[in-house]
Amino acid sequence: MTTERTLGLIKPDGLERGKQGQILDVILKKGFKIVAMKQLRLTKAQAEGFYAEHSARPFFASLCEYMTSGPIIALALEKENAIADWRTLMGATNPEKADPGTIRKEFAVDLEKNTVHGSDSSQSAHREVPYFFSALER
Ligand code: UDP
Ligand code: MG
């Protein structure tokens, strides 16, 4: 296995309900190194650009509105096998289907407000980490 970096986001519902401390604690306890972190609020255009792959989906407009509804925390996470391991720790997109012990099972509100994002592949990670962090920040 090789050391990888992936993008994590704590979405607006996580910050709104004050869950960011508990989520960061889980991330660190699972052995991820936080190599970059910042809190920000996305503009509509930034949210649409980030989720461009979903632009034709029926949930796209609502997703972008939700993702701009409050601040988020962006994380560049590093460890061996980080991309797959972060997806595993997040749990299924639909929290009702997420395994016990996953962040979404523990913290998510519903299918849209599911508390965290993670890059789904090496290709996505290579696009998404620089979407949030400049070369000087990571
Ligand atoms: N989403 C939604 N309705 C759906 C599917 C997805 O609102 O039917 C939202 C949800 O917040 C999800 C995001 O859109 O996390 C991106 O969807 P994707 O399928 O990429 O899921 P993820 O990679 O986040 O698990
Ligand atoms: Mg996805």
Image (spheres, helix red, strand yellow):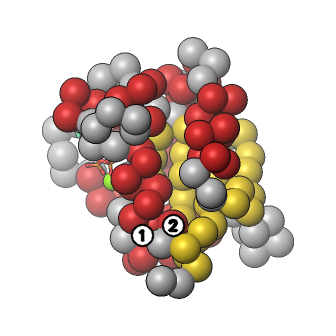
Q: Disc 2 vs disc 1: Cβ atoms closer than 8 Å?
A: no
Residue furthest toward the right? 136
Q: Which mark is residue 124?
A: 1
* Other-residue count near label 2 (Cα within 10 Å), few / some / many at <14 / 14–19 / ≥20: many
Q: Which mark is residue 14?
A: none
Instruction: Label 2: state its secondary structure.
Output: helix
Q: Is residue 64 above or below residue 96?
A: below
Q: Is tag 2's residue or tag 1's residue first in the polypeptide sequence?
A: 2
> What percent of the width, then of the height, locates residue 24?
65, 39
Pick whichever, 106 or 51, lies toward us: 106
Q: Which residue is mark 2?
A: 82
Q: Is residue 114 visible?
A: no
Residue at image point 27% right, 51% down: 55
Q: Quadrant of residue 109?
A: top left
Q: Is residue 13 left or right of residue 36?
A: left
- Residue at 42% in and 76% down: 122
**Occupied quadrant, residue 58:** top left
Residue flagged by tag 2: what amino acid is it? Ala
Label 1 SS:
helix
The residue carrying pointer 1 sits among few (fewer than 14), some (14 to 19) or many (20 or more) residues within 10 Å by Cα, namely some
Q: Residue at x 28, y 38 (%)?
A: 99
Q: Nearer the viewer, mark 2 or mark 1?
A: 2
Is residue 13 visible to us here?
yes
Specify the amino acid type for callout 1: Ser
| Residue at disc 2, CB closer than 8 Å to ligand 1 | no
Please say if 109 is above or below 77. Answer: above
